[in-house]
Image: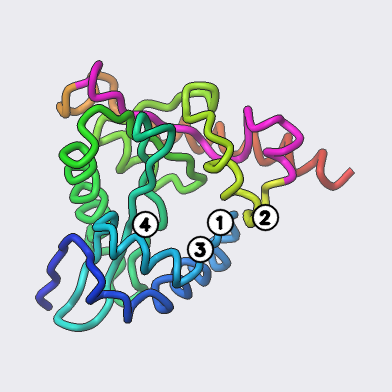
Amino acid sequence: MDITIKIANEKHSKYAQEICDTIESSALLRGTGIAKRTPEYIEKKMQNRDAIIALDCDKFAGFCYIESWQHAQFVAHSGLIVHPDYRNLGLAKKIKSKVFDYSLKKYPNAKVFGITTGLAVMKINSDLGYKPVPFSELTSDPSFWKGCQTCTNYEILKSKENKMCLCTGMLYDPMEESKDPPKHPFNIKVLNRLKLIKQALFLKKDKV
């Protein structure tokens, strides 16, 4: 197995449909929400050099792309996915680390953020120096939150006026942080408890 992780370009457009299908099937399997993207959108990210792809020779193994908001004051990494054949190999962390370093070089003044329900992604983010934050510290650009409309949890976000959802917001500010590991390690049990509390609170209300 010879997996390479590189900046994607237009030559990788042939993988766009498979990437979208893998992201969607993974979300369905986990029972989590997802902001859907089209193959055309993924292709555009590749053309603009705003994506990272992992390949095993010519076989798709993993992917992640960059989005910028408020004139590049904020950037987010979206669509992090590993093909089922390459999971449990630490590939997601390698892709995330690659896209993180690339983002800091391409957008040196931007705050890097993300929202996710995935505990594994939260752990990776924390290892890179992200901190859990309220949504008010993330971008206020309506275009970002519009992307949540295809998520199954969008009604919860909408009812909370984009201030809270099942997702956890995480932020890395290069002006305040170094890339050293955080002094207080990420507590996966605490975040999992918080996630369960939110699910019990919001989903119960949704059923009423």
CA separation, marks 1 and 4?
11 Å
> Which residue position holds label 3?
37
Q: Residue at x 55, y 40 (%)?
A: 167
Mark 2 and mark 1 lie on one chain; the one further toward the N terminus is 1
Indicate the quadrant where residue 60 lies: bottom left
Which quadrant holds the N terminus? Answer: bottom left
Q: Is residue 82 above or below residue 123?
A: below
Q: Position of residue 190 (x, y in %)?
A: 47, 30
- How is the protein colored in the picture? rainbow
Element assignment for label 2: loop
Q: Position of residue 150 (x, y in %)?
A: 64, 57
Indicate the quadrant where residue 195 lies: top right
Kind of residue at badge 2: Thr
User: Residue 150 or 140: which is nearer the viewer?
Assistant: 140
Kind of residue at badge 1: Ile
Q: Position of residue 30 (x, y in %)?
A: 54, 61
CA separation, marks 3 and 4?
12 Å
Element assignment for label 4: strand
Indicate the quadrant where residue 72 lies: top left
Mark 3 and mark 2 lie on one chain; the one further toward the N terminus is 3
Q: Horizontal placement of 183 versus 71: left or right?
A: left
CA separation, marks 2 and 1?
7 Å
Checking the image for residue 80, the label placed there is: 4
Mark 1 and mark 4 lie on one chain; the one further toward the N terminus is 1
> Which residue position holds label 1?
34
Kind of residue at badge 3: Arg
> Which residue position holds label 2?
152
Q: Which residues are magenta?
A: 155-177
Q: Residue at x 33, y 29 (%)?
A: 111
- Neighbour class for label 1 at 10 Å: few (<14), some, many (≥20)? many
